[in-house]
Image: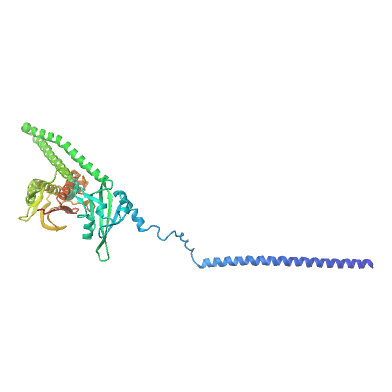
Amino acid sequence: MILLFEIIAFLLLLACGGLGFWVAYLSRNAESARKKEEELQARVKLLEDEGARLRLKGAAGPMPAPLPPPKASEEPFSMKDILLHVPDGLVVTDANLRITFANLTAERIIGLPAAEADGQPFWEVVKLHEEDGKVLGEANCPLAVVLERRTPLVRDSDVLTTRYNTEVSLAAFLAPIPDPEGKSRGAIYLFRDISEAKQVDRLRDEFVTNVSHELRTPLTVIKGYVELLMEEFGDTFMPSQKDFLRVINEESDRLAKLIDSILEFSQAKTGEVGLRQEQFNILEVLEDSIKFFTPPAVKKEIQIVRRLPPDLSPIKGDRNAIRFAVDQLMDNAIKFTPEKGTVSVEVGGWKLEDGLWKVELSIRDSGIGIAPEKVSQIFDRFYRAEQKVHTLQGTGIGLSIVKEIIELHGGTISVESTPGQGSKFTIRLPMII
Ligand code: ADP
């Protein structure tokens, strides 16, 4: 009985222990479930936040543009900074030609600190003279001309005397600064040191002069011997031999003429020999040239047409030089015109150009013409436009000398040309009394 009781008690105890165990077990499980639930809630929240963020991003469409870099300042360089560092000299004046700005290159070329130049008259700081020595001071300052005429100006042969008393050749661009009514309220002088280029030019001229001198001596000898051969043995030569000698003689003459022209005009340019100033009638020069070129024109059956007035007031200048220029144009016109073509010599009368009366003469041909892209170069030394015509005689120097001569006379030369149809060279020479 006792045993039974004990077993029942044991079982009861066991049952109670099991219950406790289960109670403890279940309560522990509830605790961890709550913690888990909390963790789960936290993660869900995280996910929801992230989802919301992603949804927001998605709703915004494509990726937003990257943010602009942080601004150091609105405008990294001021206009003044830029002008200060322009690699050409720049001087700005007010309407009274007082300097209001000079950049670093100007300071360096002139040799004067901008602060010292400030407010000074332009001509006292930028001391200029022309190549022939004529001083460009207060009375004839080129910048004053720009202010007055209210138009830009280009000058490529002025010389600057620096603060260290050295001379610098300048290429300069001058322009007015207009106010809203168009009046000049100041002016700009933009310039560049071209001393080196000028020096190269001078050396080239000297070289041409020296070479020409050297060439003239042997040429005189060649011509002398050809003449001697013809005089002494001409009767004994076969016709073809005579013909060969004639060609040598003619070509020697041509070369001698060319050398003389180069010499004369390179000297004129360097001021060694000035151009003559004589009164002459341009119509006579044109007639002489036409006469000279009639035989070669007849040979090619080219018709020379005159469109000349019966009379024309005389002009002043170097008659020989102008004749040389006209001859060059005539020579080219006949050379570059095929057989049976036409060359016309015209005088267009007096035209007012740059405030000066200029007589206009043209030589027009019906020849091969010049390609538009080559027209600007034909006045350059040794330039020949047409590769194909290189079988034709020529040196490429004629037109550059013509231009030199005409400009030395204060005139201009221009060309209009259509390939395949012909060219028209027009010279304008000023009336000088
Ligand atoms: P060149 O001795 O070659 O004639 P120029 O200086 O007189 O030298 O002329 C330069 C070039 O200009 C010529 O080679 C030619 O290509 C061109 N040219 C000059 N005049 C004419 C013309 N009337 N018609 C066509 N081309 C011309």
Q: Quadrant of the N terminus?
A: bottom right
Q: Is residue 93 visible?
A: yes
Place of residue 5 in the rendered image (x, y in percent of width and height, measured from the top left) = 92, 68
Place of residue 247 in the rendered image (x, y in percent of width and height, measured from the top left) = 12, 38
Residue 109 drawn above or below residue 95: above
Q: Residue at x 68, y 65 (%)?
A: 36
Place of residue 49 in the rendered image (x, y in percent of width and height, measured from the top left) = 58, 67
Q: Is residue 337 visible?
A: no
Colour style of the rendered protein structure: rainbow
Q: Is residue 298 left or right of residue 16?
A: left
Q: Is residue 72 left or right of residue 427?
A: right
Q: Residue at x 27, y 64 (%)?
A: 179
Q: Is residue 43 left or right of residue 140?
A: right
Residue 78 drawn above or below residue 205: below
Place of residue 21 in the rendered image (x, y in percent of width and height, measured from the top left) = 80, 65
In the depicted view, which residue is nearer to us: 366 or 194? 194
Please, which residue is most extreme toward the right here? 1
Q: Residue at x 75, y 65 (%)?
A: 28
Q: Is residue 19 left or right of residue 132?
A: right
Q: Total of numbered circles in the picture?
A: 0
Instruction: Name the quadrant containing residue 120.
Output: bottom left
In the depicted view, which residue is nearer to us: 289 or 1? 289
